[in-house]
Amino acid sequence: MKEEFMRRAIALSVDNVKNGGGPFGAVIVKDNEIIATGVNRVTASCDPTAHAEVSAIRNASAKLGTFNLSGCEIYTSCEPCPMCLGAIYWARLDKIYYANTKEDAKDIAFDDSFIYEEIALKPSDRKLPSESLLRNEAIKAFQAWASKDDKVSY
Ligand SMILES: [Zn+2]
């Protein structure tokens, strides 16, 4: 079963190259059934977040009507980038299966190692400049959230 699911993710990735997308595909499985698929549509849809895994998560969440995909597993044709890995954690997926490694991706100029390296640094030491502004004003939303009785935690 696992190999069958991965072959589907790989087939999506191969087809996506023919369809003008990047060479990435993913499927999400629940109870031994594919419930959603996703492919990379970054250039085709002018969406830098349209990676296969994020697309599959969006499709699975819409299909199941939930933001929590615990009980589901993702099969992706390539080891997730930091954005997708974060999305997979946020979605609470149970397990990641991947085929190509991030080193394989680097070999065809999809190198996300610099992002992994950046994450480990303090914000002030990263190549991407960032600075905190108006924290004392922004904290009001956090205070409102913390004291809200009917919030949906996630
Ligand atoms: Zn990604």
Image (tube, rainbow, N blue to C red):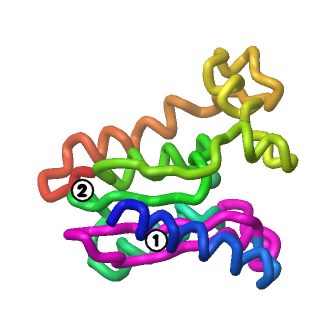
Residue at image mark 1: 58
**Is residue 30 in view from this perspective?**
yes
The image shows residue 46, relative to residue 92, as above or below, that is below
**Along the horizontal axis of the image, is 104 left or right of 153?**
right
Residue at image mark 2: 70
User: Which image quarter is the N terminus in?
Assistant: bottom left
Whole-percent x and y of residue 88?
Answer: 43, 51
Numbered tag placed on residue 120 in the rendering: none
Whole-percent x and y of residue 118?
Answer: 70, 25
**Along the horizontal axis of the image, is 49 left or right of 95?**
right
Say whether residue 29 is magenta. yes
Q: SS at mark 2?
A: loop
Residue bounds of the magenta highlight: 22-49
Residue drawn 77% across and 84% down?
19
Residue drawn 67% across and 21% down?
123
**Along the horizontal axis of the image, is 44 left or right of 84?**
right
The amino acid marked with disc number 1 is Arg
Residue drawn 41% across and 77% down?
36
Residue toward you, 153 or 5: 5
Other-residue count near label 1 (Cα within 10 Å), few / some / many at <14 / 14–19 / ≥20: some
The image shows residue 104, relative to residue 136, as above or below, that is below
**Quadrant of the rendered image containing residue 33:** bottom left
Whole-percent x and y of residue 106?
Answer: 80, 41
Residue toward you, 63 or 143: 63
Q: SS at mark 1?
A: helix
Which mark sits nearer the N-terminus, 2 or 1?
A: 1
